[in-house]
Image (cartoon, coloured by chain):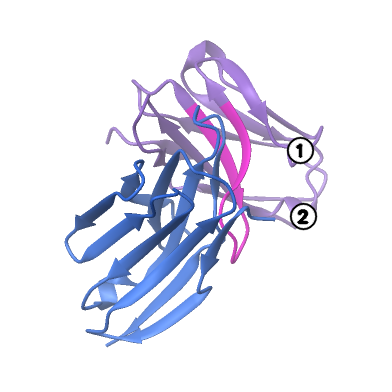
Amino acid sequence: DTGVSQNPRHKITKRGQNVTFRCDPISEHNRLYWYRQTLGQGPEFLTYFQNEAQLEKSRLLSDRFSAERPKGSFSTLEIQRTEQGDSAMYLCASLSWNTEAFFGQGTRLTVV
Amino acid sequence: SQELEQSPQSLIVQEGKNLTINCTSSKTLYGLYWYKQKYGEGLIFLMMLQKGGEEKSHEKITAKLDEKKQQSSLHITASQPSHAGIYLCGADKSGSARQLTFGSGTQLTVLP
C-alpha cells in the first residue's frame, strides 16, 4: 500500500496525558498537512509542511500542540496535557506540486 | 468557522434520483476539490477543478466551477446507495497550496 498511513487509528487517553500521532505520507510528496475534524464538521486546517519546514500554523494550534517533520519524510503531531476538547479525528494529507491531496484514514482521539 | 459554504447540510434522496450539492466562497479560488468521506474514515478524492467554467465528470458524478471561480456544484445522476456519505468541497485560496480549507460537508443518504 503506497497511500498515506496514519498510526494509531484509535487512541483513548486520560485527560492531562500526552499523545503522539504519526503520519507517513506518499514518499514522493513534499507537502504534508494536518487537520482536525469533529463530528458534523469539515476538516479544520492545523499546520502545513513543505519538506521539513513548517510553513503555516493555524491559530487552532495552541501551545499544547506541536508538529514535526524531520528529514521531510514522516511527520508527528504531539498534544500535551490533553483536554476533553481535543477529542476529534486527526487527519494527515500529502501532495506533490499540482496534484490533489491524498488523505490518510485518520487517528481518532478520545480524551476521557 | 468554515470559509467555504456548502449546501444543503444534509440530503436524503430515493435511489435513482438526481441531486446537486453546492459550494460557495466569497473569494476567488485557485483550486477547488471535491472529496467523499465515509463516517470515521479518511477523505477520498473525487475531482479537482482549476479553471473558470471547467466541468469534469466521472461515472455518474459531474462537478462544475463557475466562471468567477467562486462557486462549484457537484451533481449526481441516478443516485445509488453506494453514493451515500459525506461530500466535502475544499479549496486552495492562496494559489500556493499552503492552506487547503474545507466546507462543513453535505451528508447524503440514498434510500433503496
Chain A painted colour = purple
The residue stretch that appears in magenta = A32-48
Report the quarter where the C terminus of chain B lies. Answer: bottom left
Q: Is residue A6 visible?
A: yes
Whole-percent x and y of residue A16?
83, 44
Helix, strand or loop status at disc 1: loop
**Residue type of the residue flagged with mark 1:** Arg
Using the image, tell me which numbered label, if any, was put on residue B107: none
Side (left or right) of B41 relative to A88? left
Q: Chain of mark 1?
A: A
- The single residue placed furthest to the top in the displayed view is A71
* Residues at marks 1 and 2, CA–CA distance in whole angstroms: 15 Å
Above or below for B23 versus B31: below
Helix, strand or loop status at disc 2: helix
Q: Chain of mark 2?
A: A
- The single residue placed furthest to the left in the displayed view is B59
Q: Which residue is mark 1?
A: A59
Whole-percent x and y of residue B65?
37, 53
The residue that appears at 51% across and 70% down in the rendered structure is B7
Side (left or right) of A14 relative to B112? right
Q: Which residue is mark 2?
A: A85
Seen from the viewer's position, the closer of residues A35 and A59 is A59
Q: Is residue A34 magenta?
A: yes
Report the quarter where the N terminus of chain B lies. Answer: bottom right
Seen from the viewer's position, the closer of residues B81 and A85 is B81
Q: Report the chain shown in blue.
A: B
Above or below for B98 versus A107: above
Q: Same chain for marks 1 and 2?
A: yes
Q: Is residue A53 magenta?
A: no
Sequence-earlier tag: 1 or 2: 1
Q: Is residue A104 visible?
A: no
Q: How many marks?
A: 2
